[in-house]
Amino acid sequence: MPKDNIVKALNEQINAELYSAYLYYSMSACAASMNFNGFAAWLHVQAREELAHADKFYMHIIDRGGIVTLGPVQAPPSKWESIRTIFEDVSRHEQEVTARIHRLMDAAIQEKDHATQAFLQWFVNEQVEEERNSSALLERIRMIGASVGNLLYLDKEAGKRKAE
């Protein structure tokens, strides 16, 4: 069984992953309200991934004999002024998630919790992909600027993303 401080940190990460899902659902709804259905679909897939991440943390705690303690999930913002501001927040949020995962890994290393280190390595790798994908999409949105036609094309392309 992991030490109490590790279980506490893992439970906090469940909450953070659930918040991420709420945030991406909210962003998806906002994008849909702007009639950017492709970006809305991309964000919806992202929200569902975050729920799967929360479940991984949940199961890791259970599998290790810890107690899952769920806390309230903070309400996310519900409005953004543009697709660009949404994806600026996506990129910033993924950087924050990466920092959280790194802090968890640091704690697991300090406690010599090898099982949690092995578990967290998947998330370390996942965050490289998450940051790359969100920053690439944001950079494309920035390059497009005010070109509505190009933004609509990118919206269509973003909508092709499927759940993994």
Image (tube, helix red, strand yellow):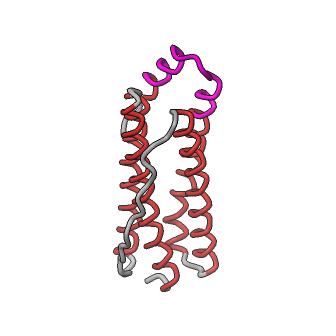
- Residue at 36% across, 55% down: 51
Residue 41 image position (x, y, % from top left): 37, 34
Magenta stretch: includes residue 142? yes
- In this view of the protein, which residue sits in the foreground, 110 or 76? 76
- Residue at 46% across, 25% down: 155
Is any atom of residue 129 visible in this view? Answer: no
Q: How many marks?
A: 0
- In this view of the protein, which residue sits in the foreground, 14 or 113? 14
> Dividing the picture into quarters, in which one does residue 64 lie?
bottom left
- In this view of the protein, which residue sits in the foreground, 144 or 162? 144
- Residue at 37% across, 33% down: 33
- In this view of the protein, which residue sits in the foreground, 62 or 155? 155
Magenta stretch: includes residue 141? yes
149 up-or-down from 116: above or below: above
Residue 87 image position (x, y, % from top left): 54, 39
Position of the N terminus by quadrant: bottom left
> Which is the main secondary structure of the residues drawn in magenta?
helix
Residue 68 image position (x, y, % from top left): 35, 76
Is any atom of residue 142 visible in this view? Answer: yes
Residue 70 image position (x, y, % from top left): 35, 73
Q: Relative to 61, is 145 on the left or the right?
A: right
80 up-or-down from 7: above or below: above
- Residue at 52% across, 83% down: 5
Q: Which residues are magenta?
A: 138-156
* The furthest residue to the top: 149
56 up-or-down from 62: above or below: above
Position of the C terminus by quadrant: top left
